[in-house]
Image: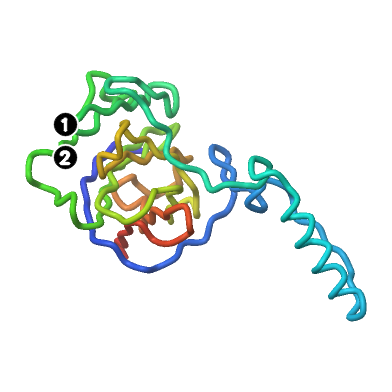
Amino acid sequence: MKRTLKYLAGAAVTAAVAVTATPAYAAPHDTAGRAAHSATVTAAQAPQAASAKAAAEAAAPAAARPHAPTPRIVQPGERVTGAPGFELWLTPEGKHWTTPDMPEGQFRSVVDGNIDLTTPGVSVQSEGTPERVYLSGLYYGGKGTASVVELETAAGPLRGKLLELPGRPGWGVWYATAKPVPGDDSWHFVSEVTVRDTKGKVYASMSLR
């Protein structure tokens, strides 16, 4: 695969993206991380079952209830490894990252005036080697707390991870990796990116279709 690099940005849209498990980032079967199971309840049993469930949930300690994930908070300059040779770190000026082909590092600014942190948006940097596709970008300007990033790619849907600096700066970095697709290149690898908040609503999104 010939390595390519893409810088794209877009405003928020309301399209939802389906998520399936991938080798690097497996999506849970439900919000508690458990596999789904089935049960049979008759019409006569339904009211009692619903009442019992409500009572159990009310009695459960708050700490035991599932919570939506939030970004990993990192200190300025703290390096996070996404894959061998793929490292990311944040500073107040923006996003820094390395790939195996560019170990000297790259930089995407959040203070150079090219993005509006008051308007929801997402950017994409996509780079590939014969072994792996490295995906990352900025997200910014959305309401609420960012929770997850969902991507539509040539390899299928996948989910990445989020990083932010302390103090709610209004922007963060998402990243993911995927296996290359024969005959495809990293320039067209991503077709849609959606960052959702802790309530499942769109924080910021972009479509390249």
Q: Secondary structure at mark 2?
A: loop
**Mark 2 or mark 1, earlier in chain:** 1
Numbered badge on residue 93: 1
Above or below, comparing residue 109 to residue 118 in the picture: above
197 to the left or right of 169: right
Circle 1 residues within 10 Å: few <14, some 14–19, many ≥20? few
Towards the viewer: 163 or 156: 163
The residue positioned 26% from the left and 24% from the top of the image is 102
Q: Mark 2 and mark 1: span between their CA atoms?
A: 6 Å
Towards the viewer: 126 or 174: 174
- The x and y percentages for residue 101 are 29, 25
The residue positioned 46% from the left and 62% from the top of the image is 17
Kind of residue indicated by mark 1: Glu
Numbered badge on residue 184: none
Labels in figure, total? 2
- The x and y percentages for residue 83 are 44, 27
Circle 2 residues within 10 Å: few <14, some 14–19, many ≥20? some
* Figure quadrant of residue 13: bottom left
Q: Are marks 2 and 1 in contact (CB under 8 Å)?
A: yes
Q: For mark 2, what is the residue?
A: 110
Q: Secondary structure at mark 1?
A: loop
The residue positioned 29% from the left and 42% from the top of the image is 137
- The x and y percentages for residue 164 are 34, 35
Kind of residue indicated by mark 2: Val
32 to the left or right of 152: right
Above or below, comparing residue 156 to residue 128 in the picture: below
The residue positioned 32% from the left and 39% from the top of the image is 173
37 to the left or right of 150: right
